[in-house]
């Protein structure tokens, strides 16, 4: 029987980064993916591909995007996103609960890891369409999120796959890992099922990179709480927590925000799981330019509390807690040109009308009078003396309300009006396994490393609590995937 140096469970971004790093060190690598090849890539294939990392200016962007022309650079203000800013964002949005050692590894390794990925052949490009607005003839990036993988999530996964295969990595699809093998001390392989046959695969180490438990209705309801069975899953139907379960069965320590998750506003009529034909298009993230109301017609959240990068991942939970688990995002003609591309897809739950009275009659499930009263109260509270500027937190507020709007407030008074119905779409769960921040090795309940077991990606706990800065999921998988792969033993 062949004994591999390492078996990697999963085939998304974190798993591939582990595979690339392991092959760099001469390890023989087998990747196991329970999905068929047509659905390969885990949650990574469903992302828009944005990756957060620390950078000091345009030279760092040039190093990662050598295809950028001088004309593009001349009309773009990339700004900076320093390690201090990254640290500040991580601690602020997680309410200072992120594990300091894991966070330090993530932030300080982010730029180096991006350059390593670029050297491997992963291509990046500026996110002009979603993260920059043109002001006075120049694009200005905001919210600390500047680059995305070429081709989005699908492009990232396809590039990873090609690079791994060229390096000699074997990838087996339709192969589900069932449990970890041990000799009573170390992990020695994996029991798997392929086409109805169950058998053992031996290895000197195993890297778990199979995602969180968001696609398991039972685990969502058990750990996130009642009502979470009603959420839609944004990504892969295969991320059912198997990697976490297998590790806990051999004594791994659980860690992090088990009742927390990344969840967003998602089209109300989206399917149960992600649809690769639509990708990330069911998301609806332009709410800072409008308002959100629930079934009573009332606003329930500060749409302008911060850039959407720092609020969208927690507002899905808020929407799920509203009456009948839905909300409507409402925009008037002053801002509809700012709406992201996802608002223009064919499969969208949208109504429009020349007046608010006509609009609310089309907004299924909403109390019409409550809505009209709310709009009147909101409009009266808008500070029209402060200029509207989507590139900065402009301080244009609606104050004195039970639910204020802190930035980007405009009166809802210019038709035609548009409204989009959203529910909750869960992206990934925050609870998972405890790892050593220096090696990405899984720790047991005595906080001792488990020989031969590593982990990376969504199933690592302790990084995110309550919320997360947009684009941090992919860099988290990249940093700790690379770290895990770098430390697997080679025979």
Image (cartoon, rainbow, N blue to C red):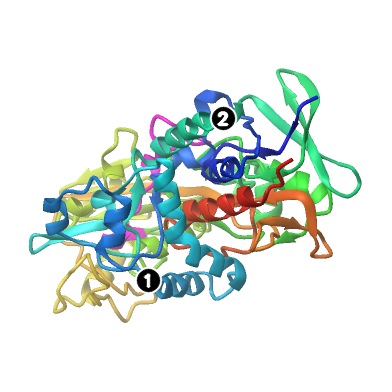
Residue 227 visible in the shown view:
no
Residue sitting nearer the eye, 295 or 82: 82
The residue located at (77%, 44%) in the rendering is 246
Q: Does the magenta stretch include residue 281?
A: yes
Pointer 2 with pointer 1, Cβ within 8 A:
no
Q: Name the residue under label 1.
A: 82
Residue sitting nearer the eye, 341 or 322: 341
The residue located at (81%, 24%) in the rendering is 1
Q: In which quarter of the image is residue 373?
A: bottom left
Residue 97 point in image, percent of width and height: 59, 73
Locate residue 256 relative to residue 444 in the image: left or right.
Answer: left
Query: Tag 1's secondary structure?
Result: loop
Q: How far apart are marks 2 and 1 (CA)?
A: 36 Å
Query: Tag 2's secondary structure?
Result: loop
Q: What stretch is highlighted in magenta?
A: 270-292
Residue sitting nearer the eye, 83 or 340: 83
Locate residue 338 relative to residue 115 in the image: left or right.
Answer: left
Q: How crowded is mark 2: few (under 14 residues within 10 Å), some or many (20 or more)?
A: some
Q: Residues within 10 Å of mark 1 (few under 14, many from 20)?
A: some
Q: Name the residue under label 2.
A: 168
The answer to whether residue 464 is above or below residue 194 is below
Locate residue 179 relative to residue 280 in the image: left or right.
Answer: right
Residue 58 visible in the shown view:
yes
Residue 344 point in image, percent of width and height: 26, 40
Residue 422 point in image, percent of width and height: 41, 48
Q: Residue 100 carries which label?
A: none
Residue 29 point in image, percent of width and height: 64, 35
Lower position in the chain sequence, tag 2 or tag 1: 1
Residue sitting nearer the eye, 260 or 245: 245
């Amino acid at each position: 029987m062949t004994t591999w140096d390492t078996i990697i469970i999963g085939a998304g971004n974190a798993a591939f980064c582990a595979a690339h790093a392991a092959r760099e060190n001469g390890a023989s690598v087998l990747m196991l993916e329970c999905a068929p090849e047509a659905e390969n890539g885990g949650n990574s294939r469903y992302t828009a591909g944005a990756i957060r990392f620390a950078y000091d200016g345009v030279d760092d962007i040039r190093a990662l995007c050598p295809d950028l022309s001088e004309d593009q650079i001349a009309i773009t203000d990339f700004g900076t996103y320093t390690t201090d800013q990254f640290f500040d964002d991580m601690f602020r949005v997680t309410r200072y609960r992120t594990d300091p050692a894991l966070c330090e590894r993530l932030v300080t390794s982010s730029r180096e890891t991006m350059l390593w990925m670029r050297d491997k052949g992963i291509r990046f490009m500026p996110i002009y369409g979603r993260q920059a607005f043109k002001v006075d003839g120049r694009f200005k990036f905001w919210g600390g999120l500047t680059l995305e993988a070429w081709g989005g999530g699908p492009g990232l996964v396809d590039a990873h796959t090609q690079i791994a295969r060229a390096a000699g990595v074997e990838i087996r699809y339709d192969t589900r890992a069932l449990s970890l093998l041990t000799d009573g001390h170390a992990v020695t392989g994996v029991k798997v099922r392929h086409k109805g046959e169950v058998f053992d695969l031996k290895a000197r180490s195993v890297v778990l990179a199979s995602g969180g438990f968001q696609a398991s209705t039972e685990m969502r309801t058990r750990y996130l709480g009642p009502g979470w069975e009603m959420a839609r899953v944004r990504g892969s139907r295969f991320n059912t927590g198997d990697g976490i379960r297998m590790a806990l069965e051999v004594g791994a320590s659980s860690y992090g925000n088990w009742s927390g998750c990344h969840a967003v506003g998602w089209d109300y009529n989206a399917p149960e799981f992600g649809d690769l034909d639509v990708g990330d298009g069911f998301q609806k993230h332009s709410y800072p330019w409008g308002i959100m109301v629930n079934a009573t017609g009332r606003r329930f959240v500060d749409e302008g509390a911060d850039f959407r990068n720092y609020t969208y991942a927690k507002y899905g939970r808020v929407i799920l807690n509203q009456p009948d688990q839905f909300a409507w995002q409402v925009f008037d003609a002053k801002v509809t040109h700012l709406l992201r591309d996802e608002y223009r897809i064919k499969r969208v739950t949208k109504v429009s009308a020349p007046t608010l009275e006509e609009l609310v009659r089309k907004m299924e499930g909403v109390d019409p009078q409550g809505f009209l009263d709310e709009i009147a109260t909101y409009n009266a509270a808008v500070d029209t003396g402060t200029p509207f500027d989507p590139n900065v937190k402009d301080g244009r507020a609606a104050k004195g309300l039970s639910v204020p709007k802190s930035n980007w407030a405009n009166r809802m008074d210019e038709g035609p009006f548009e409204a989009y119905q959203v529910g909750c779409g869960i992206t990934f769960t925050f609870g998972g396994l405890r790892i050593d921040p220096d090696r990405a090795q899984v720790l047991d309940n005595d906080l001792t490393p488990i020989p031969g077991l590593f982990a990376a990606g969504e199933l690592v706990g302790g990084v995110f609590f309550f919320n997360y800065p947009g684009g941090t999921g992919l860099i988290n998988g990249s940093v700790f995937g690379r770290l895990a792969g770098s430390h697997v033993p080679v025979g």
